[in-house]
């Protein structure tokens, strides 16, 4: 398996799970749990699971929206 870093990943439309792990800074098991729960969309081509760049952007937007609704650091 190739070693990926955020600097070496080209801008793509589809990412393999290992590449999405680097982009999102998440473990393999967390990526698959997000896929199972429907929070991160994915597609398959043959036996390869791919994550669309748009799905990654949507997931980041979801996290941002969720964090705006949370009361982190706000006085009680």
Image (tube, rainbow, N blue to C red):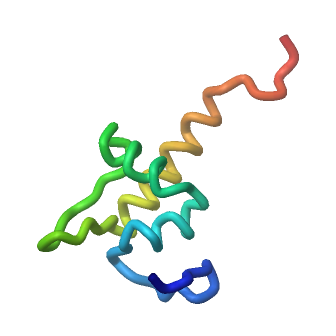
Residue 43 is drawn in which quadrant? bottom left
Q: Quadrant of the N terminus?
A: bottom left
Outermost residue toward the top in this view: 76
Task: Work out whether residue 2 or residue 62 is closer to the camera in this orientation and state it.
Answer: 2
Percent x, y of residue 51 = 33, 65
Percent x, y of residue 65 = 55, 39
Residue drawn 51% across the image and 64% down it: 21
Q: Quadrant of the C terminus?
A: top right
Outermost residue toward the left in this view: 46
Question: Compared with residue 8, is residue 46 higher up or lower down, i.e. above or below?
Answer: above
Outermost residue toward the front in this view: 1
Percent x, y of residue 13 = 34, 78
Task: Work out whether residue 75 or residue 37 is closer to the camera in this orientation and state it.
Answer: 37
Residue drawn 61% across the image and 28% down it: 69
Residue drawn 30% across the image and 53% down it: 41
Task: Work out whether residue 28 or residue 13 is closer to the camera in this orientation and state it.
Answer: 28
Q: Is residue 33 left or right of residue 23?
A: left
Number of numbered discs visible in the structure rendering: 0
Residue 50 is drawn in which quadrant? bottom left
Residue drawn 82% across the image and 23% down it: 74
Question: Compared with residue 32, is residue 42 higher up or lower down, i.e. above or below?
Answer: below
Percent x, y of residue 37 = 33, 37
Q: Is residue 45 left or right of residue 8?
A: left
Q: Is residue 41 left or right of residue 18?
A: left
């Amino acid at each position: 398996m190739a070693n990926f870093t955020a600097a070496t990943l080209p801008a793509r439309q589809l990412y393999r799970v290992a590449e999405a792990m680097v982009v999102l800074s998440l473990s393999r098991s967390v990526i698959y749990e997000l896929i199972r729960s429907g929070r991160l969309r994915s597609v398959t081509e043959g036996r390869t699971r791919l994550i669309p760049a748009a799905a990654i952007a949507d997931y980041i937007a979801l996290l941002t929206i969720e964090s705006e609704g949370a009361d982190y650091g706000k006085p009680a």
